[in-house]
Amino acid sequence: MVEARRSAAYERLYAQLEGLVRGKSPSLVAGMATMAAVLHAKLKHHSWTGFYLVAGDDELHVGPYQGAVACQVLKGRGVCLHAARTGKAVVVPDVAAFPGHIACDSRSRSEIVLPLVKDGRVIAVLDVDSDKLAQFDEDDIPPLERIIGLLADLA
């Protein structure tokens, strides 16, 4: 799905965020806030873009985000917790088909979640939703991993 146009957009976003985050953000939260704002504004297929912070083995708390009001706590199930538990990116073309999906916004139709790992431990996840089906695929993972990797030094 990452057509040439989206691939080029990811490259531009990486360069922009590298200039805004690397060596400039005073904290992880500031870096996350900047990243969520830029990704949400520049990638029009995003309806919600943000972070959830790991708050225990079975719980995530909302962090910086852009979009509709979010669930403040995710507990016990869901796409974000699955990514946090496995340490692997999760692409969900149709959220209605994901067992245990938590619908924070009923307009969400597809989702991608990527873990932010520090010293081998997931500390947060980047969660991106779209109000259209199948807006993400495996090709979105490497450029988004590279982008969230800019936060590693802040963690």
Image (cartoon, grey):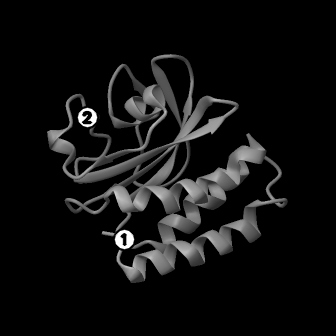
> Can the viewer see residue 47 in this picture?
no
Amino acid at the residue labelled 2: His
Q: Earlier in the sequence, mark 2 or mark 1?
A: 1
Q: Position of residue 144 (x, y in %)?
A: 51, 58
Outermost residue, left side: 97
Q: Residue at x 38, y 62 (%)?
A: 139
Give the residue at mark 1.
Answer: 2
Q: What element does badge 2 sit on?
A: loop
> Can the viewer see residue 132 in this picture?
yes
Q: Residues within 10 Å of mark 2 (few under 14, many from 20)?
A: some
Q: Position of residue 154 (x, y in %)?
A: 77, 45
Eyeballing the image, is 109 above or below 122? below
Q: Gap in Å between the C-alphas at discs 2 and 1?
A: 25 Å
Outermost residue, top side: 57
Give the residue at mark 2.
Answer: 101
Nearer mark to the viewer, of 2 and 1: 1
Q: Position of residue 7 (x, y in %)?
A: 45, 75
Q: Residue at x 72, y 67 (%)?
A: 18
Eyeballing the image, is 70 above or below 5? above
Classify residue 12 by image quadrant.
bottom right
Amino acid at the residue labelled 1: Val
Q: Residues within 10 Å of mark 1 (few under 14, many from 20)?
A: some
Q: Residue at x 58, y 72 (%)?
A: 13
Query: Along the horizontal axis of the image, is 68 left or right of 116?
Result: left
* Quadrant in which the N terminus is drawn: bottom left
Q: Residue at x 57, y 68 (%)?
A: 38
Query: Along the horizontal axis of the image, is 108 left or right of 96?
Result: right
* Quadrant in which the C terminus is drawn: top right
Query: Along the horizontal axis of the image, is 145 left or right of 128?
Result: right
